[in-house]
Amino acid sequence: MHALLLALALTAAPTVQQARAWAAEKAWEELYLGFSSVKPETVSAADRPALSGLLLDGSRTLAGTDGVMAWSLAELAEKFHSTPAVMLQLARTARATEQASAAEAALRRGLKKFPGDGDLAVELGQQLLEERDLKGAASVLEQVPPKSPRAAEAKALLGKARAGLKEEKAALQEADAIERRILSGAPEPPSTPGSTAGGGRVEPGTSDEGSLTYESAEGPAGMRVRQNSRFRFRYFSQGRDFGQRAEYEGRIQAAMNEAWEATQRILGTVRKAPLDVVLYTREEFTIHHGEGMARSVAGLYSSGSIRMNDSAEMTREVKATLTHEYVHAVTDELADNARLPHWFSEGIAEFVEWRSLGGDGPPIGVAARMKGAAAGGTLPTLASMEHQGPIGASDPAAAYGFCALSVRELAKRGGFPGLLQLLADVKGGAAFSEVLERRYGRTAETLDAEVRKQAQGR
């Protein structure tokens, strides 16, 4: 009987009355699966708040016993109607299921829509403090209204953030002095024993494998250029002073080096030529890549460069994007991404990203979305993602997860060295489909069938 009811729920669009019945019966999984593939515009505007409220009730009920379903219900509640309570619950369930970046993103979306909400600001400020983003924490906590019930808590956290910022001030002043010296052409001070500085300055357009010291200069059209043997960072100065530039460049460089080190450790290789990293504000990214891309991606690898969207905020999500996009740059150098199916190039980048975050499989939230998409018949096939990336799927997060699961399945035979050999074969002129079948005994279709069962939780 349960299976029959579930099948009916998945084949016919449920009503809000049905949602109320499921909620009354505490049938939270049926409620989630019934509405997971329903588009908000097909539900009347008057009914969406009520449906969101039922989903929120389910999330709160399951928060202590089934974290994954609690998060999934909260995510679905936001889809139909966003409120401060929904965004707070989504962030809390994301944190409970070890999805720190998803929690931060939910709180930022919530504050953007409800800027005066003290609960959201305190939650985000506390998380940023834990991650040592002191400036970000202070900025958020300063927004808590004095009359908010959590104003006293915000004041205490703000004090901690400001104390930490004072400790960092000396380091920023030192960075300011170093950059002024470099730009003025003054000689470097003599090195001292134990110095951690890299080799000499890197001339524009050249690569010195042994040097990690950065050259900083003003490029064409007011674009700032800072480079070493690994990266060339480019962005518009936007009137920032020396101290602000030193802080900005330092955060980006540290995150990009983390991506380089993670890729070397996990994939076993890195890009040999220096990589251009273009840092856009949201407005600049919109001008260059369009409003749709600016709303949907944190960054992308295109035409030999990583292009970061709104990169002034170095959130966990942006750091993860840097690793993902850096892997694209590596595979492009190894085999030319144009000769790889989209599902593979996106899958290997996503899989390395998972590993860089400490896991071998999808984050809990992504696993839940894949399961829901598979149950609702909206999970795309690998064949459909050969020439079109997962970003175009109805649920891009689920599609990216499916691509990564597929690459993980290949990695079970031969690990990353086997994947690198596959890329070498493609670079040598072999067709990807031929190499896949010869090395792994699979076609895209047979691999799809195997991995789809995993996505469905079987």
Image (spheres, rainbow, N blue to C red):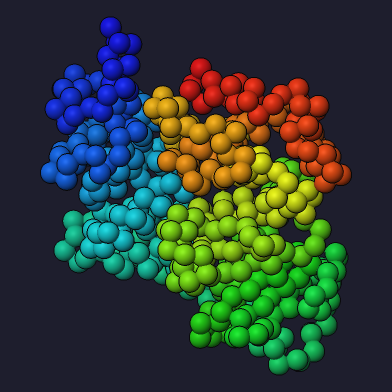
Q: How many marks?
A: 0
Residue 362 in view (yes/no)? no
Observer-nearest of 247 and 442:
442
Quarter holding residue 114: bottom left
Q: Is residue 91 above or below residue 303?
A: above
Q: Is residue 279 left or right of residue 71?
A: right
Q: Is residue 250 above or below residue 437?
A: below
Q: Is residue 267 left or right of residue 386?
A: right
Observer-nearest of 284 and 277:
284
Residue shown at the point (51%, 65%) measured from the top left = 289
Q: Is residue 98 left or right of residue 219?
A: left
Residue shown at the point (19%, 19%) measured from the top left = 25
Residue shown at the point (37%, 68%) measured from the top left = 139
Residue 417 in the image: x percent, y percent? 80, 36
Q: Quarter of the image for the N terminus: give it.
A: top left
Observer-nearest of 211 and 422:
422
Residue 393 in the image: x percent, y percent? 47, 42
Q: Is residue 161 above or below residue 318?
A: below
Quarter holding residue 411: top right
Residue 321 in view (yes/no)? yes
Q: Residue furthest top?
A: 1
Residue 369 in the image: x percent, y percent? 43, 34
Residue shown at the point (80%, 89%) measured from the top left = 187
Residue 79 in the image: x percent, y percent? 30, 43
